[in-house]
Amino acid sequence: MSEQRPEDNPLDEYASQASKKLDNLAADVSNSSVSQVVSGQVSVRDSFVRSVHSSATLLKDVAVGTVHTASLEAQSSTAGVVLANSVRADRLDAAAVAAREIESQEIRTGLLFAVQVKGPVHSALSPLAAFAMGAGFAIVLTLLRLVPTVWRRSQAANSGPRSAGQD
């Protein structure tokens, strides 16, 4: 049986060619409702989109389910989940944002994962807040487990053996 080296995979060349073609394509969506947009550069205005996957994305007055992109620029838009290397936003409301770099006028998000943040970002739950909440929850659970044990021991100590003359 011959061994096949990873560099000999015939699909690698096809994938590379398809990726180059995709990066050169541009998609412009305006005043529409679209299920999925996959392209190199995507511009979406006044539309509803379920999923966007691209190298560069521009959103203006858009509601989008998920965005997976290298670079995102958003103006007055709403998203479910944003995964990007770079996010620039005038106003973006999102359930979750994960990005290497965020530059914003205003971003409101439920869950934020970011390496570098410039500008006001309002997050209900950041990784530090999630850690603090988890630690608090663990402490409360530990205390709840200890209270019955301490109570039983104190009751056992108070009700110890009684002599016949006490009562």
Image (spheres, rainbow, N blue to C red):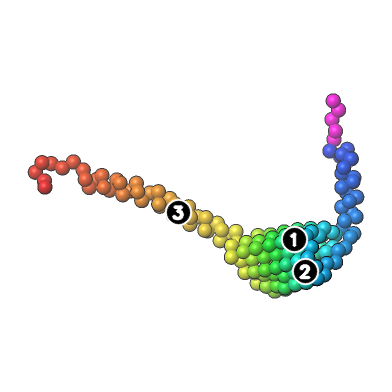
Q: Dividing the picture into quarters, in which one does residue 37 lie?
A: bottom right
Q: Secondary structure at mark 3?
A: helix
Task: Give the residue at mark 3.
Answer: 139
Quadrant the N terminus occupies = top right
Q: Dividing the picture into quarters, in which one does residue 117 lie?
A: bottom right
Task: Give the residue at mark 1.
Answer: 50
Q: Dividing the picture into quarters, in which one does residue 109 lie?
A: bottom right
Which residue ends up furthest to the top in the rendered image?
A: 1
**Mark 2 or 3, nearer chain start:** 2
The spot of residue 29 in percent (x, y) is 83, 67
Is residue 4 shown left or right of residue 151?
Answer: right
Mark 3: amino acid:
Ile
The spot of residue 121 in percent (x, y) is 65, 69
Is residue 143 within the magenta segment?
no
Magenta stretch in the rendered image: 1-5
Comparing 68 with 84, the one in front is: 68
**Mark 3 or 1, nearer chain start:** 1
Mark 1: amino acid:
Arg
